[in-house]
Amino acid sequence: MSQSAPLLLRQTRLLAAHAAPMLIAQLAGMAMMLIDTVLLGHYGAEDLAAVAVGGGLYVAIVFAFAGVVQAVGPTVAQLVGARRSGEIAPAVQQAFWLALLLSVPGVALLLHPDALLGLSPIEPAVEAKARGYLGLLAWALPAVLLHRVFYAFCNAISRPRPLMLISLGGAALHGVLAWLLVSGRWGGEPLGVLGCGISNAVTGWFALICALVYLRFAPALASYRLFAAWHLPRLQPLKQLLRIGLPMGFSGFVEISAFTLVALFIAQLGASVVAGHRIIANLAAIAYMPPLALAIATLAQVGQAVGARDVPRARVSIQAGLLLAAGVSTLLGVALWLSAEPLIAAYTSDQRVQATALSLIVFVALYQVFDAVQTVAAFALRAYKITFVPMLVHIVCFWGVGLGGGWLLAYRGVFDLAPLGVVGFWSASLASLTLAALLLGGLLWRTVVIAAAEEAPLAAAGAR
């Protein structure tokens, strides 16, 4: 056994223990989308298409703005590793201010989504329902962004259990509320997609209240003194967060929009195609949760190692994250392929929607391992506060290859291929994830090599 093998085994265990509650938290969040999809799948195709379009836009906006405020994650992780705990509270407070500032344009986009909805023709009935849904979600956005600061902080200090418990409580609340409102069992008329919007807004504020109570009263956080001396917004710390966070947020927007905006671009193909795409996108998002949880845990572990200037631990944490994520994703891809028919039947009884979904699930099964590698690599780079170049990689891969190539394959065809419809977008997504995995993996390898070279003279001097 090599000298690094025990360290690899230890970091693998740490990552698995850290990622497990994060995975449950992520799945609880995804359960809310699953609940909406299943309820509306049995309510009506128009409402399901509306949540596919409106939900896709909302998730893209949330990922963009939440990515910016989550710059506090690598910042806090490095401070923890460097044992500079006195600087953590000011950093978290500035992130809260940033979340409030970003809520203003975010709410405006949700209340006035004309530019986004105008990207592709949409059936009038579907567009009207999507507008109403987005208007309700606007009420939730400030709470969601503030909660993401809490989320990033807890991850950075390796305390994921509160995130898990709050997410489970939110999912349970949403399940009950959405079921009552969508179906009309609350005593009034069935609200369809609007019922899902109301329930999401209520759940967002519930999660934030729980987070604030934990931050204020948890004994484990007393040493951080998060609210002991509240700081007003400060230009320099906000600029530092924005320098790291803006590329993170834009990367998140590019990545998620490359998948969710497909719902807009295929809207002209009809509600059944959009609904089938929504089901497969939902399954893909669920399958994405394990590598995402491992990537988030990897960010914390690598960030703490970088702050402590512990190059071997950072390198081994990256290795453990990549190996775990690739292995789990491969198993998930196989499981999705083998259980395709019963899974899709659980979502909808509409045969046309089922046929569309079954034709697309092969792409989800195939691209899991590439998605896992590029996700862990991107989050590990964030731990080094390297965010700009990964953003460029995401733009080229997800917008250039994914959306641009997908549009060509779907509506124009290339070489001797006839237009492929929605299959074209999913084919291009597979190509984009493969390219992103190669580019980000190479960038991460170069970063680790450079960090080791920079630390070697310091280690030698210390030894002398």
Image (spheres, rainbow, N blue to C red):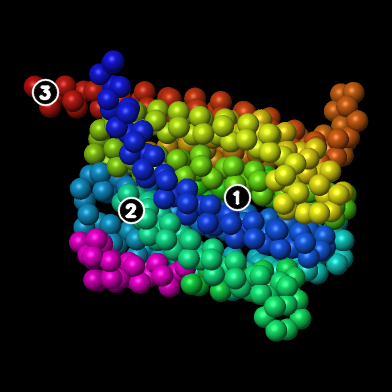
Judged from the image, the secondary structure of the residue bearing numbered disc 1 is helix
Percent x, y of residue 450: 35, 25
The mark lying in front, picked from 1 and 2, is: 2
Q: Which residue is mark 2?
A: 159
Label 2 residue SS: loop
Disc 1: CA contacts within 10 A as few (<14), some (14-19) or many (>=20)? many
Which residue appears at 77% of the width and 61% of the height?
42
For marks 1 and 3, the one nearer the N-term is 1
x, y (%) of residue 301?
34, 40
Where's residue 260, x and y in %?
69, 50
Residue picked out by circle 3: 463
Image point 57% across, 42% down: which residue? 288
Instruction: Judge depth for marks 3 and 2 and give the one in front.
Output: 2
Outermost residue on the front side: it is 342
User: Disc 1 marks which residue?
Assistant: 253
Span shown in magenta: 207-234
The kind of residue on which mark 2 rests is: Arg
421 relative position to 459: left or right: right
Q: Counting other residues with Cα less than 10 Å from the Cα at mark 3, is it few (<14), some (14-19), or many (20 or more)?
A: few
Q: As rendered, which of 175 and 163 lies closer to the eye?
A: 175
